[in-house]
Image: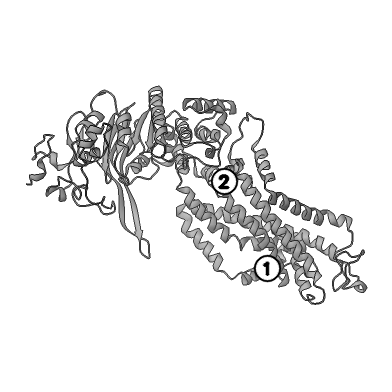
């Protein structure tokens, strides 16, 4: 997604010996928020992937005598109502939540950008595709998700295993129910771009539509796509937690950040710190991804990069 | 009807436009029904000889740019034929059109909008090469450098982006892109209108120099009459989608025949303060009628200072004045006197 403008520019002999990626990196570095966001996101990803190797407690191990414990050396984040270690559950849940967020965002952005570009560029398909978009916007999402889960859960679980099956089901369910905003924004941008003279110039050269889109349209609608992508991660993580809460997502004993958050809500009065950790993790992830997206968008725009 | 040409008799015209029509449909109402057309270009015909510059002038909204774009088939024309270098352009299918694209190119009005802000100069100039020629990376770069030399751009600018250039430099990039495929015919769509006056002369001189060197044929669209007088060999004057007068530059500027041309030329300021003081501009009353609902008869009849009864009833034919000069006005019809002294306004039949 992010390499579209560079990929659109064919490689050429460079007089200065520097590739454009260096310019992109230089600009990205100069964006303090983006650098900080990248550091935080990198830290979160590292700790949820490599953390379980160091902190070897099983996230599903039940130690009923140590239930509802506060922070201690044995359990730095405390334990939950069944005595499971919250740090281990945070790390296991983070893997799932981040994977769900990234994958669902990717699906919805690719789908949304594709439908938006096609609808904006080909007038013939516009009415149909925008009708489809409005139809999806008007659909009541929860009953739709319920039906999808009912129809496909068994089949997917049988072919990919229960966890992988649920993962595929959830990311595709979130992906295909959240592309509409992107599609609408992208379509509007494409409609405006299509009338610009550089598109006319490409037409007078005889550039076919496919290359016209890849070379002239997509790189110029990158900013709105980027913004909806970063926002999409946040929405996907939260939608997943809502689904898990309704029993439509992962099984109840399977930790995700959203599930941890909802489990902790029951004990909000007694143990408020239990809401704090998953909430902080979700917020930090969303915030850091937003800053990364912001920095990337600036870095990929040559007009800003020059400054 | 426009086949009579002077000068290079033996030569065939490079561009032959016959009865070109470009209507943009108007949709309105709940069901987006087709309720009418904007007649942006309403049946125009002209020829352009190889190596010649035809100036196309007229006020804003009269359809000048639409003519240029329809000739290059950037729009799907409503009717008429366009023949460039012996090939029919207006109604061929997409694939055979693509192979004809290299011989006809366009230079755009707004150099800012006509360059993709996310592409470097080298990739902008190289795009036509990628599309139509199979060149190795070295050949491609050599060609890009050659084009940049032609239009007077420093080779070191190849890696820069359009926003880093001034308006004149951007227009040079646009010209280099148009030249990349060795075109025969270039439509210059107000190439200097968006530039500073100090830069305009540079760009026009560059266009003239390139024309001499590469034997290019231009359709030079402009509303700047002094610039057209400088660059064009022949001039066509448009009003509301139609050509009202077409003549050689000398004839047109010395002795305009159509009342609209007269009004247009009288609006040009004189450089000499003495004659500027004596200049009496013909001020046209009212506005240009809507091209969606042009007046009956002559399009200019609503504003013409010499309007006659017949003008409001009947569309004027095209009258030949020899040497390729044509005027579409009832003042010069057979029943009228064909002298250039247009006192016929008072004489109503």
Protein chain holding label 2:
A
Residue A23 coordinates in the image, percent (x, y):
65, 39
Residue at the (34%, 31%) spot, across then down: B86
Residue at the (71%, 64%) spot, across then down: A155
Tell me the residue that label 2 is attached to. Answer: A219
Q: Toward the viewer: A72 or A53? A: A72
Protein chain holding label 1:
A
Evaluate whether residue B324 shows in this view. no
Residue A12 coordinates in the image, percent (x, y):
61, 32
Q: Is residue A241 left or right of residue A205?
A: right
Evaluate whether residue A26 shows in this view. yes
Q: What distance separates the C-alpha of mark 2 from that of mark 1?
A: 36 Å
Give the quarter of the image for residue B85.
top left
Q: Toward the viewer: B204 or A51? A: B204
Q: Is residue B285 positioned above or below B165 on the image?
A: below
Residue at the (13%, 34%) spot, across then down: B340
Q: Is residue A186 left or right of residue B1?
A: right
- Describe the colour scheme in one phrase: one colour
Residue A212 coordinates in the image, percent (x, y):
51, 43
Element on which disc 1 rests: helix
Q: Is residue A263 positioned above or below B90 on the image?
A: below
Q: Where does the C terminus of chain A fall, quadrant-wise?
A: top right
Q: Earlier in the sequence, mark 2 or mark 1?
A: 1
- Neighbor class of circle 1 (other Cα within 10 Å; few <14, some 14-19, many 20+) is some
């Amino acid at each position: 997604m992010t390499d579209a403008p560079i990929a659109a520019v064919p490689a050429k002999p460079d007089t200065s010996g520097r590739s454009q990626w260096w310019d992109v990196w230089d600009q990205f570095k100069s964006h303090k928020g983006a650098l900080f966001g990248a550091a935080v996101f990198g830290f979160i990803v590292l700790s949820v992937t490599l953390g379980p190797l160091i902190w070897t407690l099983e996230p599903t191990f039940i130690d009923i005598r140590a239930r509802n414990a506060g922070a201690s050396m044995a359990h730095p984040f405390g334990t939950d109502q069944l005595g499971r270690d919250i740090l281990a559950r945070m790390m296991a849940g983070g893997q799932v939540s981040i994977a769900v967020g990234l994958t669902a965002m990717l699906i919805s952005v690719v789908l949304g950008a594709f439908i938006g570009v096609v609808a904006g560029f080909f007038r013939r398909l516009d009415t149909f595709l925008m009708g489809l978009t409005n139809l999806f916007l008007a659909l009541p999402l929860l009953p739709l998700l319920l039906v999808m889960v009912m129809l496909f859960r068994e089949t997917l679980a049988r072919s990919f295993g229960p966890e992988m099956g649920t993962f595929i089901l959830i990311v595709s369910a979130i992906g295909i129910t959240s592309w509409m905003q992107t599609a609408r924004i992208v379509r509007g941008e494409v409609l405006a771009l299509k009338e610009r003279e550089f598109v006319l110039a490409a037409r007078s050269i005889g550039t076919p539509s496919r290359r016209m889109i890849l070379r002239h349209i997509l790189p110029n609608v990158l900013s709105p796509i980027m913004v909806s992508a970063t926002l999409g991660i946040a929405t996907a993580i939260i939608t997943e937690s809502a689904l898990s809460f309704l029993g439509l997502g992962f099984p109840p004993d399977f930790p995700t950040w959203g599930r941890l958050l909802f489990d902790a809500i029951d004990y909000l009065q007694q143990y408020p710190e239990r809401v704090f950790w998953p909430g902080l993790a979700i917020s930090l992830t969303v915030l850091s991804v937003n800053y990364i997206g912001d920095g990337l968008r600036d870095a990929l725009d040559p007009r800003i990069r020059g400054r | 009807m426009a086949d009579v040409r002077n000068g290079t008799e033996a030569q065939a015209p490079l561009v032959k436009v016959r009865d070109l029509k470009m209507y943009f449909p108007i949709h309105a109402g709940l069901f987006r029904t087709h309720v009418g057309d904007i007649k942006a270009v309403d049946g125009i015909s002209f020829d352009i000889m190889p190596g010649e510059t035809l100036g196309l002038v007229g006020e804003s909204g009269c359809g000048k740019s639409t003519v240029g774009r329809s000739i290059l088939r950037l729009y799907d024309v409503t009717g008429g034929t366009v023949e460039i270098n012996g090939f029919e352009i207006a109604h061929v299918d997409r694939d055979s059109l693509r192979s004809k694209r290299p011989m006809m190119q366009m230079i755009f009005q707004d150099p800012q909008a006509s360059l993709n802000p996310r592409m470097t100069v080298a990739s902008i100039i190289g795009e036509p090469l990628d599309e139509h020629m199979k060149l190795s990376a070295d050949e491609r770069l050599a060609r890009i450098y050659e084009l940049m030399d032609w239009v007077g751009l420093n080779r070191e600018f190849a890696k820069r982006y359009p926003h880093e250039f001034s308006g004149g430099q951007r227009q040079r990039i646009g010209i280099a892109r148009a030249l990349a495929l060795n075109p025969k015919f270039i439509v210059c769509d107000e190439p200097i209108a968006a530039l500073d006056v100090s830069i305009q002369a540079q760009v026009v001189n560059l266009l003239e120099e390139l024309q001499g060197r590469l034997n290019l044929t231009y359709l030079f669209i402009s509303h700047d009459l002094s610039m057209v007088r400088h660059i064009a060999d022949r001039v066509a004057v448009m009003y509301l989608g139609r050509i009202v007068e077409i003549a050689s530059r000398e004839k047109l500027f010395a002795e305009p025949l159509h009342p609209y041309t007269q009004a247009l030329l009288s609006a040009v300021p004189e450089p000499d303060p003495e004659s500027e003081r004596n200049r009496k501009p013909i001020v046209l009353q009212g506005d240009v009628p809507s091209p969606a609902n042009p007046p009956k008869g002559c399009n200019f009849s609503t504003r013409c200072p010499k309007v006659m009864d017949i003008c409001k009833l009947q569309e004027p034919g095209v009258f030949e004045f020899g040497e390729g000069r044509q005027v579409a006005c009832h003042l010069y019809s057979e029943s009228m006197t064909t002298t250039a002294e247009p006192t016929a306004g008072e004489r109503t039949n």
